Image (cartoon, rainbow, N blue to C red):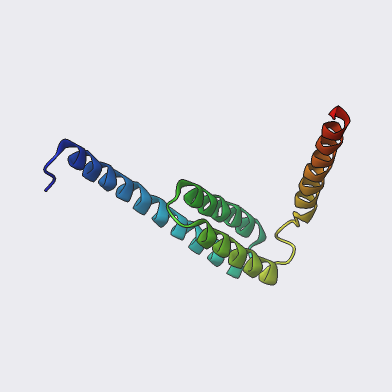
């Protein structure tokens, strides 16, 4: 058992984190399983909803540090590939939003460079 007050507190905090992490991991696993089942049953409405909930659960678990970000990304990627393979019309394509955001950043950086050179 802990001998000092700080080590007692740390032990208590560790138990709280362990409980929170196990709950979040369990919810994430359940969401992913439901999404896979919904996609495999080829029910479009149910699959869309379950897919979005699974993505949200994985992202939240990764942001909280419950699971590593790379694992969450891998699971999201594999779930997306499965969904697109079985139900190609179920998921919207978001490549335009990513491309627009990157071009906006590039334009902003270019303008910042121009203003910096104009000040000199």
Q: How many marks?
A: 0
Residue 69 relative to residue 118: left or right = left
Residue 44 relative to residue 58: left or right = right
- Residue 86, given in percent of the width and then of the height, sits at 67, 71
- Residue 75, given in percent of the width and then of the height, sits at 55, 64
Could you tell me which residue is drawn at 85 percent across and 30 percent down? Answer: 120
Q: Is residue 67 above or below residue 39?
A: above
Of 40 and 28, nearer the camera is: 28
Of 75 and 10, nearer the camera is: 10
Could you tell me which residue is drawn at 13 percent across and 45 percent down? Answer: 2
Q: Is residue 62 above or below residue 118?
A: below
Residue 77 relative to residue 120: left or right = left
Could you tell me which residue is drawn at 23 percent across and 42 percent down? Answer: 12
Q: Is residue 39 above or below residue 31?
A: below
- Residue 57, given in percent of the width and then of the height, sits at 51, 51
| Residue 4 found in image quarter | top left
Residue farthest top in this picture: 119
Residue farthest front in this picture: 120
- Residue 96, given in percent of the width and then of the height, sits at 80, 52
| Residue 80 found in image quarter | bottom right
Residue 89 relative to residue 34: left or right = right
């Amino acid at each position: 058992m802990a001998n000092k007050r700080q080590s007692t507190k740390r032990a208590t905090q560790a138990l709280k984190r362990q409980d929170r992490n196990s709950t979040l991991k369990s919810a994430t696993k359940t969401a992913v399983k439901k999404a896979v089942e919904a996609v495999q049953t080829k029910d479009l409405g149910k699959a869309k909803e379950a897919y979005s909930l699974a993505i949200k659960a994985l992202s939240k678990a990764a942001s909280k540090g419950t699971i590593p970000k790379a694992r969450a990304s891998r699971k999201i990627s594999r779930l997306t590939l499965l969904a697109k393979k079985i139900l190609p019309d179920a998921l919207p394509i978001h490549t335009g939003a990513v491309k627009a955001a990157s071009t906006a950043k590039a334009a902003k950086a270019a303008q910042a460079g121009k203003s910096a050179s104009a000040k000199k």
